Image (cartoon, rainbow, N blue to C red):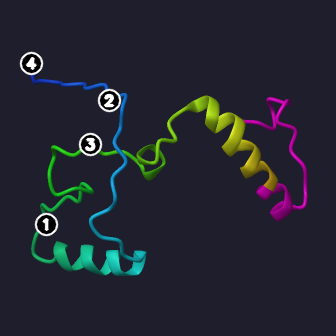
Amino acid sequence: MQTHGQFKLTRREALIARQPDHVMRWRDFRTWALDELQGKSTLIFRGHNSAEHSLVTSFHRTGRRNLLRYDTEDVPRLRRQMEVALNTTFNLLDPLEYV
């Protein structure tokens, strides 16, 4: 069996922070998506109405794609919140606790 196709990979270093077009609660989105799906069995929700827009998470849209910053700012903040919520401590220097 022979296959063929095209693949395009674009590296985007400088992401532009964008405001969302519309914000809704999960319940409202779910209702909207299910209503859209009615009678359209081939509908696939991509997240944008145009394939020209890149799919990036809100984490990346806000410029938080620097792993060093994630490691030095976000992980310790998350650790503190988890320690309080779980009433325990985590040692980030221990690889078995920092997975």
- Amino acid type for the residue under numbered disc 2: Arg
Cα gap from disc 3 to disc 4, whole angstroms:
30 Å
- Amino acid type for the residue under numbered disc 1: Ser
For label 1, the SS is loop
For label 4, the SS is loop
What residue is shown with label 4? 2
For label 2, the SS is loop
Crowdedness near tag 1: few (<14), some (14–19) or many (≥20) residues, C-alpha within 10 Å: few
- Amino acid type for the residue under numbered disc 3: Ser
Of mark 3 and mark 2, the one earlier in the sequence is 2
What residue is shown with label 1? 41
Cα gap from disc 4 to disc 2, whole angstroms:
32 Å
Mark 1 vs 4: CB contact within 8 A: no
Of mark 3 and mark 4, the one earlier in the sequence is 4
Task: Locate residue 60, reporting x and y percent.
Answer: 44, 43
What residue is shown with label 3? 54
Cα gap from disc 1 to disc 2, whole angstroms:
33 Å
Cα gap from disc 3 to disc 2, whole angstroms:
9 Å
Mark 3 vs 2: CB contact within 8 A: yes
Residue 66 against residue 89 in the figure, above or below = above
- Between 56 and 18, the one lying in front of the other is 18
Mark 3 vs 4: CB contact within 8 A: no
Of mark 1 and mark 4, the one earlier in the sequence is 4
User: Which label is found at residue 57?
Assistant: none
**Magenta part of the chain:** 81-99
- Amino acid type for the residue under numbered disc 4: Gln
Residue 31 counted in the magenta span: no
Quarter of the image where one finds residue 52: top left
Q: Quadrant of the C terminus?
A: top right
Of mark 1 and mark 3, the one earlier in the sequence is 1
